[in-house]
Image (spheres, grey):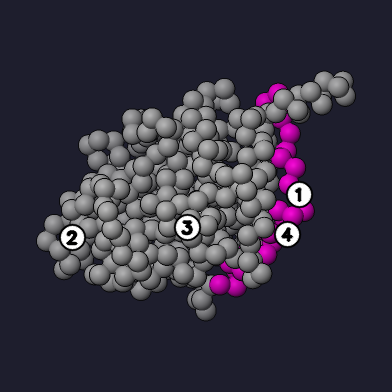
Amino acid sequence: MNGAQRLPFGESTEQALARATEFLRTARDADGWWNDYEVRGPGQFWATAFVGASLAEFPEGPGRSAAESAWELLRQARGPTDGWGYCPQVPGDADITSWVLRLAEALGADNDPRADEGYRFVAAHLQDDGGISSYLPQHAAPFLDRVAPRWDAWYASHACVTTAAAGLLRLPVRERLLTRLREIRRPDGSWPAYWWPDREYPTALAAEALTADAPAGDRPEAAAAARWAAARIATDGAVRTEWEPEGSAFATAFALRAVLAGRRPEDDDTVRRAVSYLIDSQEKDGSWRPSAWCRVPGPMEFDPDARQHWERGRRGKAALGSVVLDTKALYTTASVVAALARTSTATVTSAAAESSRAHLA
C-alpha cells in the first residue's frame, strides 16, 4: 500500500494493553474460565470464547498464553459434535460457537478435529435467506420449550450472528454469508443487530469479514461502514449510545474497528481521538467500565429495535425483554483490548505520509 505507515501510538497504548491484559488474566476463576453476564448463571463459555479471541490478537506474550489456555478448556468441553453455548447448562448456539472458532483461527488451531466439528455445527445454522440463526430447534427445543412453546424469532437468521460467523475464513458457507451481509447493509453504511442495541458491533464485524481477503482498493462496503462509524465518534473520541449517554467504551472500540477496516486516510484524526478516549477512560485496575449491553428479545420478537421499553438486568426466564450488562467488565475490556491491539499494528495511507515521503526523497 503506497504511503503506508504505522499509526503512531506507541508507549501509552502498550501500557494500556499491558494493564488490561493483566486484569483479564487475573479475572479467571480457579479452573481458568472467564465468567461474565448473569442471565442463566454466568456466561462461562461465552465470556471465555470472546475474551480468548480478543487476547489472541497478540502474536505473543501473556495475553496470547491466556488465549491458548482458553482454547484448551473450550476444546475439551461438550461432546465432539456439540456447539458451544452460553454456559455448560445451555444448548450450543451458532454465535458463541463462532467466537470459539474465531479464537481457534487466531491461534492457528482451526485444523483441530474439535474445530472441524464446530465449523459443521455453525454451517448447519444457515437459513434460506443466507444468514445464520442463533439456534436450531433440534438442539435447543428441549431446553427452550420449558420456557415458552414457540421460539420462531430465535430460530431465524440474525444479522449480528451472521457477521460473527462470516469472519471465519474456514467456514464452508462463508461466501453465502458475505452475500447476505451485502444484502442487509443499511443505506447509512451500518449493519443491524438482533442481540445488541449498539450497531457498532455488527458493523465492525461485517466490515472486517468483507475485507478479510479483498484487495485494498476494493472495499466499498468497508468505506461506507467507516464513514458511518467515524460519524459516531464524537470530538472527544467517545461513542455515546442510548444506554451509555456519557460514552461507551464497548461501542467506541467497535466503531474504531469499523474505521480501521475502511482504511480511509481522512480518518487518521478520528482514530487518534478514539484511541485517546479509550486510554484516558481506562480504570486503575486495567479494566474499562462495563458498557457492553446485550438484549434478550422475546421468543417471537423478530424486530427488537421496534420495542419501546426494555427492563434492565433481569435473570432467568424474566430476562426476556430485558437488557443485561457485563457487570464484571470482561466483555467491555476484551473489546477494547482487541480494538487497541488492531490499532497498534494498523497501517493507513495518508496525504501527510505521502507528502513526507516525497519530501524525504
How far separated are the C-alphas under marks 2 and 1? 50 Å
Amino acid type of the residue tagged 1 in the rendering? Gly
The local crowd at label 1, few if under 14, some if 14 to 19, many if 20 or more residues have their Cα within 10 Å, is few
Label ID, residue 10: 1
How far separated are the C-alphas under marks 4 and 2? 47 Å
Direction right: furthest residue? 360
Reading the image, the residue beneath label 2 is 141
Label ID, residue 15: 4
* 177 inside magenta stretch: no
* 5 inside magenta stretch: yes
Whichever of callouts 4 and 1 sits on the residue coming sooner in the sequence is 1
Name which residue lies at 52% across and 29% down.
Answer: 223
Name which residue lies at 72% across and 25% down.
Answer: 351
Q: Position of residue 39 (x, y in %)?
A: 34, 69
Q: Position of residue 117 (x, y in %)?
A: 36, 52
Q: Secondary structure at mark 3?
A: loop
Whichever of callouts 2 and 1 sits on the residue coming sooner in the sequence is 1
Reading the image, the residue beneath label 3 is 244
What's the magenta region?
1-27
How far separated are the C-alphas under marks 4 and 3? 26 Å
Q: Secondary structure at mark 1?
A: helix
The local crowd at label 4, few if under 14, some if 14 to 19, many if 20 or more residues have their Cα within 10 Å, is few
